Amino acid sequence: MTDDDAARTKSEQAPEPGNSAAGGAQAGTGGPGTSGEPRPSGSGKEEQDGIVREGFTRNSFRVGPNVDEELYYSVTSTGATVIGDHSSAANAQIYIGTDDKPGPQAGLITGLDDLQRVYAPAPSDRDLDELLGQRHVVCLTGAPGTGRFTTARVLLARRHGEDSIREIFLPARVDPESLCADKTVPVEGAGHILRLPGGDGARLARLLEERFRQRKASLVLIRDLNAHRATEAGAEVRHERPDPADVFERHLCHLLRRVDGAECRDACGADGCRSRYVRDCLGMSNLRKALADQYRPADIVAIAATVARHLPTDEQAMQRSLATTPPQLRSRAISILLPGEAADRLRHQRIGQYERAFRIAYAVFLHQPLRYVLNATGLLLGLIDEEARRPDLGRPALEHPVDELLGDVLRQDWNDGRSGDPGASRRVHLRNSAMRGAILSVAWHEFDNSRSALLRWLGRLAQDGDATARRASAEIAGLLAHHEFEQVYEELIDGWAQSPRPSVREAAALATAVADRGGEVGTQVREKVREWVHNGTNRQRDTAVLVYAGGMHQPHLGWELADLRRIAKDRMQRHNQVIAEAIYQLYQPAAAGAIVAELSRWRTVVPAGRHAVRAWLALAERPASDGISPEMLARLNSGDVDPRHVAALWRSALLSRERPPKGRPESSRAWDLFGEWMHRADAAPALRASMLELLRRLAVTPALYQRLCFYLPRIFANAGRLPDWLDTV
């Protein structure tokens, strides 16, 4: 008996001949999904019948393309100018197995060559380097955002080489002490970095010292500075920020360098060079002040990027450029929400609150019709009154024009966004969309007793508002979680994740994805998602799979597959296409073999088998990098995936009895996609051998052999006959 014969199960018996497409297959553009409105779920009905998310298309749950710019000042996660947690690590290994709790993993850190060229030394570097020469495990303490991770990467790269630096990731509920007995971590001869959420870094350094010495490896532990505990000499080094002018100079020189590294941009005229231009910039008093006012190196890098983009040549031009940098945006936001002392004395307290509430709502609903701002302002004022334990004072009607409520600064933005059509609905406009995040950050940090009212306000917008209000509130909740993770999740997002309403759970997932985009709470976000999966309810797991479908990844592929495997067991997911979308978002060519092998294991397990079929169909229609061939067919042809697993998944899909509550049977869609594969192989002779081998493996199943005899002539009906290369089957 062959492996393919053994793989057959009773569940794979062929369905009755139906209305599957008989002509040339047309790959759908929507991916795995259904259509229509989510059903309201109350008193467990959702868990019994399964949730149906309709109107679902590819990338439905991804964060909007403008969120990074609007909330996080266009922070990116790639390139040599990356500072702090905004960097990325590429996983060196892939865990695939049945254990939901894999051990520690060491991901390879990339991009260190460019980073070393722009690195500005910190005053504490010498102490850290000396300690690394004496010990194999040291602890680097300091405040978040000061460049600790960058320093650790650069100093370890100098000691171990640029291609030997790894970041250690620990699964949820696994202590760092587990590294003492782990077989794969540390990697021999490599430098390692481990971020500690808390605890005694010096004690852990002593505990791990012998283990890393045996492997000739190094480890830098990064922990936040504890004001109640002194830095321990001989085991810990307190990190200090690099000089702001040095950071600016190195990054600006790098940004001005041409791709070949030989010439500068035309920033300083025919007689100058980029070094002279940088010196001229540093001679401008407004730039020096802006640099001195910065605390985080990342903000200085943002200033350098802005200067490189605008190339100001005098102080007036420099001031215009600085107006778009994070520090200046924050100053502008403060002027919007904190009017001067003289103005406050002339105004009634309620008018000031009214204006601030209106301006906060204006920022929340950027690009949306003004009616959202008006309605949300009244709701926020009512919650402010409730927080102050006073009667709802309401709002005067027909008294305050929008221009007056916006104030001098925002009024200009509002008027600039005026449409040429006098009858068009007015929409919220900000000349610099990054002001959205700046205003909300000031509202969160600069007022006493405001946080509870803001969180309750966002909660009401998500619970009672429409899709636009929910999305806006979720984006702002994610920003606030980036500032105060525990409070925002405890008081707001955790409640959304357990809501009986699918749309509110979607808001929780979006907020979680937005929080992750800021780069400072990524570890906490991933632990929260895994907590929902393994310790939560069905509804929390539904929220978790939405986060994955939005494109968020765990630092190790196996952890995410283990989470999706657990979610697939829930009855409420039986009609849900989101697990398939999560697999689609997870996919990367290097992991093709591991993902296909995992799906092949799912197919024999109820109820995960139905999700294996849906995920396979999503991957089967995914285009390859050439934009023509199906990605999985290209991987099959190159030997990156096991042909036995591919055949098993096609067998389950082509003989599937599953049918969505609305829409075509999955087997019908499978035959369409299979036809696409056949047509592509017919057009590309290099793919035919792999396709013939796949057909042979499928034909050993009697029911599928009958179907192939029926469908193959119809797949090539337009040609009038089967291609000659199929004669050998």
Image (cartoon, rainbow, N blue to C red):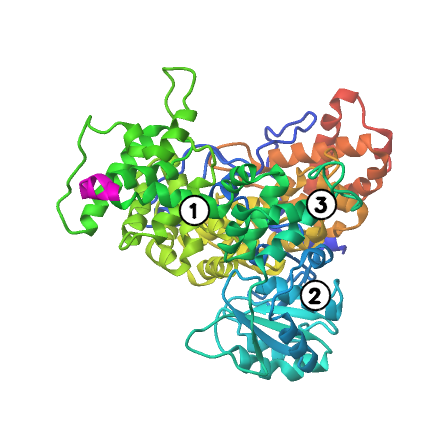
**Residue 540 in picture, x, y percent from top left:** 42, 54
Earlier sequence position, callout 1 versus callout 3:
3
Q: Is residue 309 magenta?
A: no
Give the CA separation, mark 1 to mark 3: 30 Å
Establish if 289 lies above or below 258: below
Question: For this view, does 391 lie left or right of residue 341?
Answer: left
Quarter of the picture containing the N terminus is bottom right
Earlier sequence position, callout 2 versus callout 3:
2
Three-letter amino acid code of the residue under disc 3: Arg
Q: Is residue 492 visible?
A: yes
Rendered residue at 59%/39% (across/down): 314
**Residue 617 in picture, x, y percent from top left:** 63, 41
**What residue range appears in magenta?**
342-352
> Which residue does the numbered mark 2 point to in the structure image?
165
Count of all numbered marks drawn on residues in the image? 3
Q: In the rendering, which numbered label is found on residue 330?
A: 1
Q: In the rendering, which numbered label is found on residue 274?
A: 3
Mark 1, secondary structure of its residue: helix
